[in-house]
Amino acid sequence: MDMELVFTTVAVVLEVIGALAMCVGFLVAVVLGIRSLQRGEGGGTAFQVVRTTLGAAILLGLEVLVAADLIRTITSKPSLEDAAILGLIVLIRTVLSISIQIEIEGVLPWRRALLTSGGQVIGDAITRDRVASDAATDADTRARPGDGTVPRSDAIL
């Protein structure tokens, strides 16, 4: 088995995963923003949800793409030009990642007490959405007494 082919395949798979992470993250961000608007939380809150979730998805995708670039170095034939191009690509993606992280969290990455990955931020956004949705459902049910509806606290959205 040719190891160069294996590492090239792994790099391509990681690139696809990185792109998919950004695309799926975009869809998740839009859905969470729409749900926020439907709950009546206002445009500002919906915008913040979309911005935070989309930023986290881009951050996650960039992290995976940087990993793909690093693996691709294993398969490339060493030349100064290739190394410089790869270094520039990794540098640009790293600067973008740091910028997005600062934008999402409002804090420099090295000033945070705990490290948070893009996946954790997306998971937190989904959890906040679920909690807000459950609270809105409970409030809506309490606001309509006697209409025959039974609150469903075990419902999974």
Image (cartoon, grey):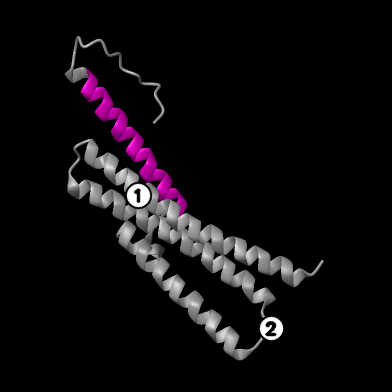
Q: Residues within 10 Å of mark 1 (few under 14, many from 20)?
A: many
Q: Is residue 68 left or right of residue 119?
A: right
Q: Which kind of residue does numbered mark 2 sit on?
A: Lys
Disc 1 to disc 2, C-alpha distance: 40 Å
In what element is the residue under mark 2? loop
At horizontal 36% and vertical 58% (from top left) the residue drawn is 55
Q: Is residue 51 left or right of residue 67?
A: left
Q: Is residue 20 left or right of residue 148?
A: right
Figure disc tally: 2
Q: Vertical placement of 139 versus 119: above or below?
A: above
For label 1, the residue is: 29
Q: Position of residue 93 (x, y in %)?
A: 45, 71
Position of the N terminus by quadrant? bottom right
At horizontal 27% and vertical 14% (from top left) the residue drawn is 149
Q: Position of residue 81 (x, y in %)?
A: 58, 89
For label 2, the residue is: 77
Q: Residues within 10 Å of mark 2 (few under 14, many from 20)?
A: few
- Which residues lie in the magenta part? 117-141
Residue 80 occupies which quadrant of the picture?
A: bottom right
In what element is the residue under mark 1? helix
At horizontal 24% and vertical 51% (from top left) the residue drawn is 47
Based on the picture, tell me whether residue 127 belongs to the magenta stretch.
yes
Tell which circle, 1 or 2, labels the residue nearer the N-terminal end: 1
In the rendered image, the residue lying farthest to the right is 1
